Image: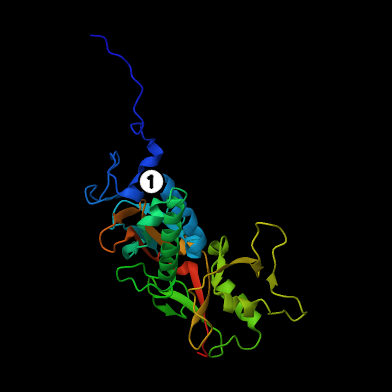
Amino acid sequence: MDVVDRPALDGARVQETGAAFAGFVRTGATIEMKAFTGVSGDAGGYAVPREIDATIDRALVTASPIRQIANVVKVGSAGYRKLVTTGGTPSGWASEVAARPGTATPVFQEIAPPSGELYANPSASQAMLDDAAFDVEEWLAGEIATEFGRAEGAAFVNGNGVNQPKGFLAGPTSPAGDGVRPFGTIQHLISGTTGDFGANPQDRLIDLVQLLRAPYRQGACFVMNAGTLARIRKFKTNDGAFVWQPSLSAGQPATLLGYPVVEAEEMPDIAAGTPSVAFGNFRAGYLIAERGETAILRDPYSNKPFVSFYATKRIGGCVMNAEAIKLLKFAAN
């Protein structure tokens, strides 16, 4: 019996591969999974497709300024560890025939960034999701990026390290110099006046820059919030020149004493005893460890008629090298 090719009936057309995720978001339809995932497909969740995950990462760079300047590593589990050597390797001089006694070896320190699960839980009505003209993917990426950027930006600066990253302002600080402070303690410089810069404020900024050793000053930047930056932009040298130098070309940042400034609204306002200005090489000083994938769970049952999109991402962070970051503390002593 000959087989006759017949045209497919209307409604039986093959669905395009790119529409599979859109169908899941709008209706919860099950799709075949090829990639490994830690979330059960039967429960309605799976790893976000690469196109949407890339959109989220690009948006995070704008929302979380610390991510732009820190050392970001992708990890496969929450048990990430990093070894840092301290003290260097001492050497010595000897004559041609003199004995060579042993020298000390570097000391290893283990860095284990505290981590937690960052989540966002935006919702939309089923009627909105049914609207074919509505760009579901763009909306979903924007909502998740906004929440993730706000939460992680705050944690990288002030996080307490309990089920979240530990911010670089959350650890101990000391006025002691490099090589004297305990490991992990950031050096701070006193402004000389409680809650203010005091006399010759531009001199304190110069002192802060010079606290950082020369190898770290390559790639260093200032970090402060907009209120602090507004005050510093008005500082002038003795000859009347502004210490702030605006950008002269598109794409190039404005500079303070020759170094770029990063605005982080999570930095504290100038007040009594606050470390409101940071200067350092954050790529050498602060570590962000994150899982590469974001997981999303579609929940149309908990809050009818709304559909919730529960997204999670595991991320950690901590100070990696305390010598690479310096703080200006607004106190008298």
Instruction: Judge the density around disc 1: few (<14), some (14-19), many (≥20) Cα neighbours within 10 Å.
Output: some
Q: Position of residue 87 (x, y in %)?
A: 40, 65
Q: In the image, 115: left or right of 197?
A: left
As helix, strand or loop, the secondary structure at mark 1 comes to helix
* Percent of width and height locating residue 2: 26, 9
* Residue 112 can be seen in this image: no
**Is residue 41 rendered to the left or right of residue 191?**
left
Check the image and report above or below for 109 versus 134. below
Residue under circle 1?
22
Residue 245: horizontal and vertical position, in percent? 70, 69
Dividing the picture into quadrants, the one containing residue 86 is: bottom left
Q: Residue flagged by tag 1: what amino acid is it?
A: Ala
Identity of the residue drawn at 44% across and 67% down: 150
Q: Which residue is at the far front?
A: 10
Q: Nearer the viewer, residue 79 or 269?
A: 269
Considering only vertical position in the picture, is 207 above or below 89? below
As drawn, is 261 to the left or to the right of 19?
Answer: right
Q: Nearer the viewer, residue 180 or 195?
A: 195
* Residue at 44% over, 49% down: 54
